[in-house]
Amino acid sequence: MLEVIDAEAPDGRMRVELDAGPAGATCRPTDRGADLTLDVAALGAVYLGGARLRDAVLAHGADEYRSGALAEADDLLRTGDVPWCSTFF
């Protein structure tokens, strides 16, 4: 479970449950306790790849409520390919 601090979310934060496996992934809101709290900017930094979550949380910090939650989320959100743009702008 992730708790994301986001000024645009109701109450300034939201909790989501991520479920991922070889067949695909889902993300849905939840009221369950968070394993990890982080700022939405950290998620934005890793969204397109090329950055590790463990590095992205350095700017705003993260609270880990279950040992290993940050490492698990880092592995889950890591991409195999580096970002690439085929157009010049």
Image: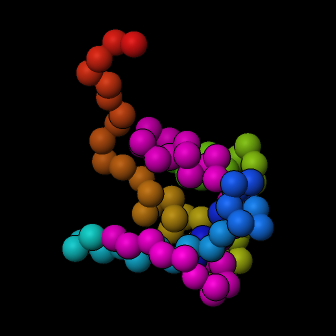
Residue 28 picture location, percent across and down: 48, 75
Residue at left offset 66%, top offset 78%: 34
Residue 37 picture location, percent across and down: 69, 67
In what quadrant of the picture does the C terminus appear? top left
Q: Residue furthest top?
A: 88
Residue 68 picture location, percent across and down: 59, 72
Residue 54 in view, yes or no: yes
Q: Is residue 80 above or below residue 26?
A: above
- Range of magenta residues: 25-51
Q: Is residue 86 above or below residue 25?
A: above
- The answer to whether residue 46 is magenta is yes
- Left or right, 86 with respect to 74, comes to left
Residue 68 in view, yes or no: no
Q: Is residue 36 above or below residue 53?
A: below
Where on the picture, by quarter, is residue 32? bottom right
Q: Residue furthest left?
A: 23
The one nearer the camera, 66 or 11, is 11
- The answer to whether residue 41 is magenta is yes
Where on the picture, by quarter, is residue 83? top left
The one nearer the camera, 18 or 52, is 18
Residue at left offset 62%, top offset 73%: 15
Residue 82 picture location, percent across and down: 35, 36
In what quadrant of the picture does the N terminus appear? bottom right
Number of residue marks: 0
Residue at left offset 30%, top offset 41%: 81
- Left or right, 3 with respect to 85, comes to right
